[in-house]
Image (cartoon, helix red, strand yellow):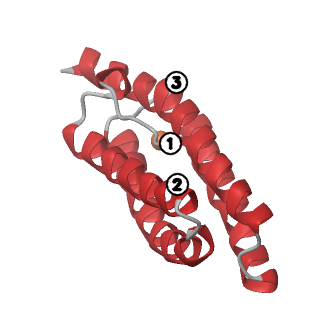
Amino acid sequence: MAIKWTEDLATGIEKIDEQHRELFRRVNELMEACAKGKGKEQVLKTSNFLSEYVVMHFGEEEKIMREKNYPGYEAHKAQHDGFVKRFAEIKEKLGQTGPTVDLVIKMNNFLVDWLFNHIKKTDKALGAYLKGQM
Ligand SMILES: [Fe+2]
């Protein structure tokens, strides 16, 4: 099982799209490890990588939004903040209990659901706005 990047996920902002593809690659790496029974080992690596990468990525998007006076900035940023909070909660549990199967699945599902929904609606709306500005 793997999540697939398709063109309809593109925002049209090359830097952002490349970062999204990297996020997909990392989530796929976790999913593949799970399929091979190595999810517990991989989930710590993936979550450590993502906790830095995602903050950098959200920062880039938010910088663009501020520069372009994007009217949806507050709502978009609130979604990013919501992700960071939920991700930190799952990561904290990982630290407490170690990578249980339940937590690995929770992390996986959260990443996949959130990424698809956020990119398809929120990031694409930003992309459309920027296109209209150019
Ligand atoms: Fe975003």
Characterize the local packing of mark 2: few (<14), some (14-19) or many (20 or more) Cα atoms within 10 angstroms: many
Name the residue beneath numbered marker 1: 1
Placement of 3 over or under 36, stated as above or below = above
Callout 3 secondary element? helix
Q: Dots 2 and 1: beta carbons under 8 Å? A: yes
The kind of residue tagged 1 is Met
Q: Mark 2 highlights which residue?
A: 31
Image coords of residue 36 (percent x, y): 52, 62
Which residue type does callout 3 highlight? Lys
Quadrant that contains the C terminus: top left
Mark number displayed over residue 39: none
Residue in the foreground of this view, choosing between 99 and 38 = 38
Circle 2: residue type? Met
> Vertically, is 122 above or below 95?
above
Of the image marks 3 and 2, the number of the one nearer the N terminus? 2
Label 3 – label 2 distance at C-alpha: 24 Å
Report the Cα–Cα distance between label 2 and label 1. Answer: 7 Å
Q: Is residue 51 left or right of residue 20?
A: right
Q: Is residue 89 left or right of residue 117?
A: right
* Residue at mark 3: 121
Ligand 1 is within 8 Å of the C-beta of the residue at disc 2: no
Q: How many marks?
A: 3
- Picture residue at 57% right of the left edge, 31% below the top: 117
Question: Which residue is found at the position 25% from the left and 28% from the top?
Answer: 12
- The outermost residue toward the front is 36
Please tell me which residue is depicted at 27% across the width and 15% down the height of the picture: 132
- Asked whether 130 or 71 is in front, the reply is 130
